[in-house]
Image: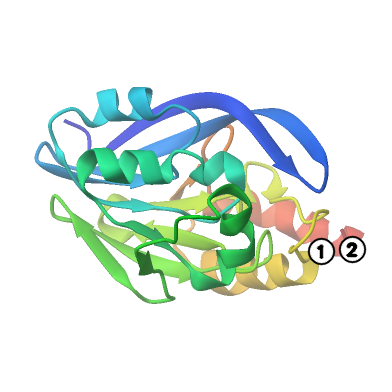
Amino acid sequence: MSPVDHVVTSGTFSLDGGTWDVDNNVWIVGDDREVLVIDAAHDADAIADAVGDRRVVAVVCTHAHDDHVNQAPALADRFSAPVLLNPAEAPLWEMTHPDRTPDRPLADGDTLTAGGVVVRVLQTPGHSPGSSCLYAPELGTVFTGDTLFQGGPGATGRSYSSFDTIIDSIREKLLTLPGDTTVRTGHGDSTTIGAELPHLEEWIARGH
């Protein structure tokens, strides 16, 4: 079994009075015994089917936009697992789950382990105040949520976001990773750190 499983779920993202149709990448990381679920989006049944009979160590949220967390409590309850989120995401989390708080905080430098796979938390604010990426060195993979995509940084045009901050986060936390590191994103296709370096330089030159 691959140490990384992938489910694409479909639904909506709502913020600042607008709603958009989106497809989300849900990542399941571990082995045939236990896993981490990264960004429980839209379809708890589909995610649970992909998990199967494995133990869920944690439901990890890269950030708290509703399309990334709308099924986190349901999935966590189903598998008796904690929800992990950076505390700076509280204002966004509360928009979706006002009556439920995450179970444990995510902080820069934390390590999570499932099935022998060690994942290190990289705090990368900008797309949102407490956005986190999850780096698995032994897999040569970083899960970037909506911080870095194929073609450039995540969106920063909505509430609680900052272009300057996301660029600093990418420069300091992601571009320092090996160039052949696979970037597994919150939406769309995967890429590599090396492939995104020229795109980032273009964004900086454009100023947005």
Q: Is residue 185 visible?
A: no
Q: Is residue 82 above or below residue 49?
A: below
The residue drawn where x is 56% and y is 54% is: 64
| Disc 2 + disc 1, Cβ < 8 Å | yes
Circle 2 packing at 10 Å, graded few (<14), some (14-19), many (20+), is few
Is residue 54 or residue 5 the one in the foreground?
A: 54
Total label count? 2
Q: Residue 163: image x %, image y %?
A: 78, 64
Q: Amino acid at mark 1?
A: Ile
- Quarter the C terminus occupies: bottom right
Circle 1 packing at 10 Å, graded few (<14), some (14-19), many (20+), is few
Q: Quadrant of residue 164?
A: bottom right
Q: Is residue 140 left or right of residue 68?
A: left
Q: Residue 55: image x %, image y %?
A: 14, 43
Residue most extreme to the front:
99
Q: Quadrant of residue 159?
A: bottom right
Q: Residue 168: image x %, image y %?
A: 68, 73
Is residue 129 or residue 198 the one in the foreground?
A: 129
Q: How is the image coloured?
A: rainbow
The residue drawn where x is 62% and y is 68% is: 125
Q: Which residue is label 1 attached to?
A: 204
Q: Which residue is label 2 attached to?
A: 207
Q: Residue 75: image x %, image y %?
A: 33, 39
Q: CA distance from mark 2 to mark 1?
A: 5 Å
Is residue 45 or residue 165 the one in the foreground?
A: 45
Q: Amino acid at mark 2?
A: Gly
- Quarter the N terminus occupies: top left
Q: Is residue 47 visible?
A: yes
Q: Which secondary structure, mark 1?
A: helix
The residue drawn where x is 62% and y is 70% is: 169
Q: Which secondary structure, mark 2?
A: loop
Is residue 54 or residue 19 the one in the foreground?
A: 19
